[in-house]
Amino acid sequence: MSNLNIKRLRVAVAEYAKPSTNIVLIIFTTDIIVYISVIAGAVFLENIFSRIACSLLAGLQISLLFVVAHDAAHDSITSSRTLNRVIARICFLPFLHNYSLWLIAHNRLHYQLTNLKGGKLMVTAFKK
């Protein structure tokens, strides 16, 4: 893809790529409340089928929290770097992942393995 096409693409999606703190806080709060609710259901409900359903929903909710954590760790969901860090740290808790270590590992892989140069995948992380 030429630089001209990349610039046109960035201009076209810029309107949709703006961080919205209000929407993010609603999504974050809803995801946390739903997660706590299904965990409580898995622990306190008496019916085994309800417990299983809550456990499955908790797993799904953890994956939704990961999406929020990933975007917050990239400082891309709010305009506040501090708020992004707080949201990312809280969202990483349910799947017991260290935020700081994730930043190092993910960004190393993300920027060294997934960038394209001249149409070829860059694999500099594995070159000796």
Image (cartoon, rainbow, N blue to C red):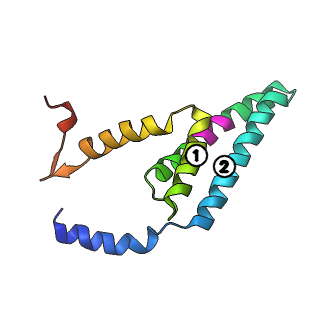
Q: Decide if residue 77 is on the left or right side of residue 29.
A: left
Is residue 68 among the parts visible in the rendering?
no
Which residue is more in the foreground, 32 or 120?
32
Which residue has dot 1 on it? 64
Figure quadrant of the C terminus? top left
SS of the residue at dot 2? helix
Q: Amino acid at mark 2?
A: Asp
Q: Name the residue at 46% across, 38% down.
A: 100
Whether residue 11 is visible to the viewer of this picture, yes or no, is: yes
Residue 55 at what x, y percent from top left? 70, 31
Q: Nearer the viewer, residue 88 or 42?
A: 88
For the residue pair 110 and 120, the one nearer the viewer reads as: 110
Point out residue 108 in the picture as x, y percentages from the top left corner: 31, 40
**Residue at the (41%, 41%) spot, across then down:** 103
Q: Amino acid under label 1?
A: Leu
Q: Residue furthest right?
A: 46
Residue position for label 2 = 31
In contact (CB < 8 Å): disc 2 and disc 1: yes
Image quarter where the N terminus lies is bottom left
Tell me where the magenta segment starts and ends, as one range.
Answer: 57-63
Q: Residue at x 50, y 52 (%)?
A: 72
The tag earlier along the polypeptide, 2 or 1, is 2
